[in-house]
Image (cartoon, rainbow, N blue to C red):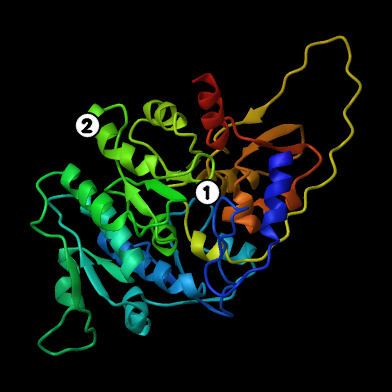
Amino acid sequence: MLVLFLGCAAAGCLRGAGLDWPTNRFLPTFSPPAATIDCIDVSSATGSEADLFASLERIVNRAQPRIACVSGSAEEGEFTWLNLHNLTYALINGYTAVLKYESNVTGLVVTDTTQPDTLNLATAIAGLNNESICDPSLLSRLTNALTNAPYNLAIKDDLRGTFSNKYQVYQRLYTNYWPQCTHRIIAGMETNGHGHLREYLVAAKAAAIWLDPGVPSDAAALAPFLSGMAPVGGAYMGWWPDESAGLSWIATYGIPVVASDWFDNASLFGGVTTPVTIPPIPPAPLLQNKVYVSITLSDGDNVQYMQHHMKQNWGNAARGRFPIGWTAQPIAADLDPGMLNYYWSTATTNDCLVAGPSGLVITHIFWCLF
């Protein structure tokens, strides 16, 4: 409860123009969103298009949140969180948005389909240089040099044919771009995972990797990044190729883990000013001499569960009929205070939000053991 209270207090800090990241917050906050949000439906988009539109979202939203990417496949519903955050939005075709905000980007960073980890390298480059991530399959549409219409996006960084393996990719990331990236966030992102948290990483100018510390060569490639981060003052977002190996390894660095790789529109929702109001704790019943059963739903330790499947469960008509503990991620107070406040404000006296048993907490446990 104390962690939630402190996070809520931080969520009320004054904001400046664009991204704001005071030292008393784990994660950054963004400016208040525009009056109307351009909403891109990525339900039928390819993975390459999802990355393109998401990279545009994060570049634009860094100054002021103006774009959201939504999908009809979302468990909670396509527009659920836009509505719950009281945001006005208008649907826009993804390529129309590319054209509308073309002046916000400096050009394209082109990935190499034969080296999937170049998507993670491109994520860092996009954030640092305001470039849109582009799969080679989209080049003919976005760089029409012959007619110059309707797009005229130049290739600024071409990663094709440059690397023979993923270690070369991450060495380039570490040598050329890590010094410019924020050292308060690093993220584990699958190389076949498109959109989602990537938009947030670009907005925060964070590095993305996909390495398994349980593999010695992967651990050797990842260690220099973590050595440049301050214990407790930084956060590992996304997730791991191997949960157990990743969590136990990073605990030795004292870096908290925020399971978040499937979280959507964080750069938008992170700009919605919402005081988090925790309801009074109901009085405890007098205990009797009998066996008590406590029911707690797990998985709320990761924020994407809170955004997706937990929202679906929360809508069950039977909720509130008997006491249930709902695990939640306290760092939602930084990442999306509106979402956290939604759960608190709609909770019945039989619904209790408790800190989940992993994420930030499991890192602390492992760290103490070592």
Residue at (66% x, 66% y) in the render: 273
Whole-Å distance between the Cαs marked 1 and 2?
A: 35 Å
Vertical side of 250 occupied by 65: above or below: below
Q: Position of residue 345 (x, y in %)?
A: 75, 52
Please name the amino acid that badge 1 sits on.
His
- Front residue (pair 83, 259): 259
Q: Position of residue 50 (x, y in %)?
A: 33, 62
Disc 1 on helix, strand or loop? loop
Please name the amino acid that badge 2 sits on.
Ser
Q: What residue is pinned by disc 2?
A: 217
Residue at (59% x, 59% y) in the render: 22
Vertical side of 23 occupied by 296: above or below: above
Q: Quadrant of the N terminus?
A: top right
Q: What residue is pinned by disc 1?
A: 308
Residue at (19% x, 78% y) in the render: 154
Residue 85 occupies quadrant: bottom right
Q: Position of residue 10 (x, y in %)?
A: 68, 55
Vertical side of 77 occupied by 36: above or below: below
